[in-house]
Image: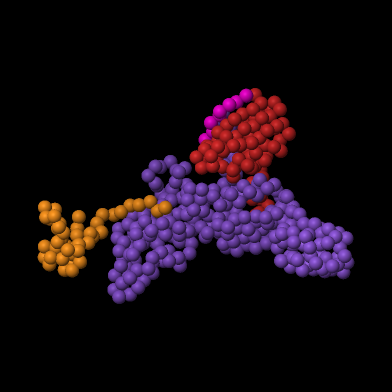
Amino acid sequence: MELKIIEKKDDEIKVEIKGESHTLLNMLKHFLLEDEHVDIASYDMLHVSISEPVFYVRTDGKDPVQAIRDAAVKLTAECDEFTGVFEKTLA
Amino acid sequence: MDIDILELSDRSARFILSDVDAAFANGLRRTMLADVPTLAIDEVNIYNNTSVLYDEQVALRLALVPLLTSFDEFTPHEECSCEEGCPACTISLTLSVEAPMGEEKTVYSGDLVSADPKVKAADSNIPVVKLKGGQQLVLEAIAKMGYGHDHAKWQAGVACGYKNVPVINIEGCDLCEKCVEACPRDILALGEESAEVVDDRLLNCSLCKQCVEACGIDAISVSENDTSFIFTLESDGSYSAEELIINAVNTIRTKASTLDNILGEL
Amino acid sequence: MDYKCTRCKRAVEIDYQYTGIRCPYCGNRILVKGRPTTIKTLKAE
């Protein structure tokens, strides 16, 4: 994974996330939209096989980088919860 | 989040994942299909091939053989610090078969001998090529760890999918039995006062809504639960179904924490 | 490159000065190219 910041303001960010696909980005978008400080969170791939996805976040003033980090932490927590529940179910 | 395991065998699993969003369920499905790294033969050094197949065909057939993989022992080749391939991302397997004169012999995936006893063909009975008497196939195959999004030979999960848990509501039924006859999966049966869902058959509902159409008085409604999913998955044999699920979740977690770390360094 | 005569099975050197192809031992005109003894490396995909 490699990030390339295309545009960054106080309340918005446009970042290219190299090597990622819908798998991570759709989950990330979902957790970002759960954040009440986030107004817009979306991503775009110009071409499915040759373009790198560009992620766009706009907030109501919250640092957008922090918003993405919070979403990533939420996703990590969701994974931890899944592993925990799954192992408990198997036991 | 809640998980209810319906079936769990070595190669396949079926479970209900509830109280999660579609985004997570879909992420999990996509990860199992394309982002869990496995070992597969990527390079073949052919010493001798007098079989009827071209070298390239033999190589492709070998590449598609699923190999038992230990997730933690290998690094995907593209993320490895080496360029040419090293013991951390590659493993060598050899194959040497000659059909005795006047006899036919089939080369099976089980004839691949690896340097590491833990790495071997997940199924030993996959035919590779049939040799006639005197024909010979001698080669060395280099297996590398890779991702399913680069080539299907690295796909760990096959036939991974989910559907929403069906919700069937029956209210004001007049016991006309039309819905029971309409249902192609025998989910409904007549009860004392109204048509009812047969115990344990609910999950077989395909949401075809033929019962809704058949009902003349709109007493039945079929919808789906947006936060519960019936997951079905099959592993190609490189991991057990259980390992596949855990590896998929670990892969997502690694991706999320990598993103968090990179953003933290900005 | 090694060639082999399909009739007498002997290894044959091709004489490029001569415009035709012919086995110098038996006169057969069908020769087959043998598999080289080098190791062939290829990508499996």
Q: Nearer the viewer, residue A38 or A86?
A: A38
On screen, residue B246 above or below B183: above
Residue at 53 percent across and 37 percent down: it is A52
**Highlighted range, magenta:** A1-9
Residue A17 position within the rendered picture, expressed as x and y whole percent measured from the top left: 55, 36
Say which of B167 and B37 sits in front: B167
Which lettered chain is shown in purple? B
Horizontal and vertical percent for residue B35?
Answer: 54, 48
Residue B7 lies in the magenta stretch = no
Residue B222: x percent and y percent? 77, 57
Instruction: Assign the C terminus of chain B to one quadrant of the image.
Output: top right
Say which quarter of the image contains residue B78. top left
The residue drawn where x is 16% and y is 68% is C8
Residue B241 appears anywhere in the view:
no
The chain coloured red in the image? A
* Quarter holding residue A78: top right
Horizontally, residue B147 falls left or right of residue C6, namely right
Image spot of residue B124 (x, y percent): 45, 66
Q: What color was chain C assigned in the picture?
A: orange
- Magenta residues, dominant SS class: strand
Relative height, residue B80 to residue B178 (above, below):
above
Q: Is residue B84 above or below residue A40?
A: below
Q: Which residue is at the front of the view, B185 or B70? A: B185
Residue found at the very far bottom of the displayed protein: B102
Q: How many marks?
A: 0
In magenta segment, residue A4: yes
Residue drawn at x 68%, y 62% is: B6
Q: Residue at x 29, y 70 (%)?
A: B134
| Viewer can see residue B80 | yes
